[in-house]
Image: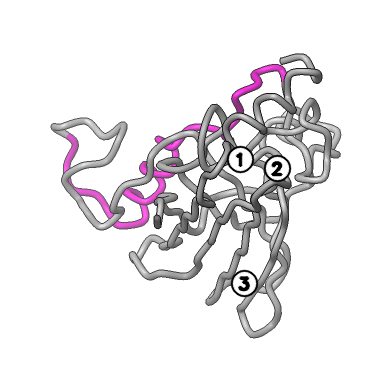
């Protein structure tokens, strides 16, 4: 999409006249179906921004990549249904089911297919819409992050509601690595938690 049209998209869909700011949230659950994080979204009226507050707990210290993925998350406790699971497949472990569900969520949400993986601070031509960067987890297993993003939306073409958030095991290199995985997903490794983005109001 040409740059000159981007302001029109934001103005029309993110902040239409007299609209109430939309809010959404996501609970992140691990393979044991334990809630280990929460992400809150709220539109900032008239500024073309979405505020995103990320909180995680019971995680390994260090940096963890976190992204909005294309697909719709489901309850990962069910051993009977998961996107991508064959009907005749035998019962599997919770971890295997978790991995299958995460794989079925697809790649990072990205409406502009020519973009590569990057940092949330990058220009939209150098990042996926769903790129949220890293969250830093301290020695007590907790991590907090707040960012204000111009691509993440709660309405219109770049709406992330009913999509998924995935927290990853490793740090995200923000597309700066010298390999194909870097520009695809930042090399952030296996998922450790995921959840569905749901509208509040």
Check residue 60 in the rendering and tell me which mark sits there, or answer none.
3
Splitting the image into 4 quarters, where does residue 5 fall? top right
Q: Earlier in the sequence, mark 1 or mark 2?
A: 1
* Pointer 1 with pointer 2, Cβ within 8 A: yes
Q: Position of residue 50 (x, y in %)?
A: 64, 50
| Label 1: how many Cα within 10 Å (few below 14, some 14–19, many 20+) | many
Residue shown at the point (60%, 29%) measured from the top left: 12
Counting from the top left corner in percent of width and height, residue 11 is at 66, 32
**Foreground disc of the pair 1, 2:** 1
Q: Residue at x 77, y 31 (%)?
A: 124
In front: mark 1 or mark 3? 1
Foreground pick, 125 / 158: 158
Residue lying farthest to the front in this orientation: 18
Quarter where residue 141 is shown: bottom right
**What residue sits right under mark 2 in the picture?**
48
Q: Which mark is residue 119?
A: none
Compared to residue 85, the image places residue 23 above or below, namely below
Q: Earlier in the sequence, mark 2 or mark 3?
A: 2
Q: Is residue 91 magenta?
A: yes
Q: Residue furthest top?
A: 2
Q: What range is drawn magenta here?
A: 89-114
Q: Given this view, does label 2 or label 3 mark the residue nearer the observer?
A: 2
Q: Position of residue 49 (x, y in %)?
A: 69, 47
Cα distance in 3D space between marks 1 and 3: 38 Å
Q: CA distance from mark 1 to mark 2?
A: 7 Å
Residue displayed at 19% across by 36% down:
89
Q: Is residue 136 above or below residue 120?
A: below
Residue under label 1:
15
Earlier along the polypeptide chain: callout 1 or callout 3? Answer: 1
In this rendering, the answer to whether 46 lies above or below 117 is: below
Q: Quadrant of residue 101?
A: top left
Q: Secondary structure at mark 2?
A: loop
């Amino acid at each position: 999409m040409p740059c000159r049209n981007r302001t029109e998209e934001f103005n029309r869909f993110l902040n239409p006249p007299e609209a109430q700011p939309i809010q959404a949230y996501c609970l992140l659950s691990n393979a044991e179906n334990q809630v280990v994080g929460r992400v809150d979204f709220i539109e900032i009226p008239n500024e073309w921004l979405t505020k995103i507050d990320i909180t995680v707990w019971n995680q390994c210290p260090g940096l963890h990549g976190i992204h909005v993925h294309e697909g719709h998350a489901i309850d990962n406790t069910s051993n009977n249904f998961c996107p991508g699971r064959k009907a005749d497949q035998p019962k599997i472990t919770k971890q295997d089911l978790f991995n299958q569900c995460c794989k079925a969520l697809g790649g990072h949400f990205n409406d502009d297919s020519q973009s590569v993986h990057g940092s949330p601070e990058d220009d939209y031509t150098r990042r996926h819409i769903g790129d949220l960067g890293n969250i830093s987890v301290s020695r007590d297993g907790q991590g907090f992050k707040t960012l204000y993003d111009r691509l993440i939306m709660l309405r219109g073409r770049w709406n992330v509601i009913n999509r998924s958030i995935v927290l990853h095991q490793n740090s995200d290199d923000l597309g700066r690595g010298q390999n194909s995985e870097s520009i695809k997903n930042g090399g952030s490794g296996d998922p450790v938690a995921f959840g569905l983005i749901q509208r509040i109001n």
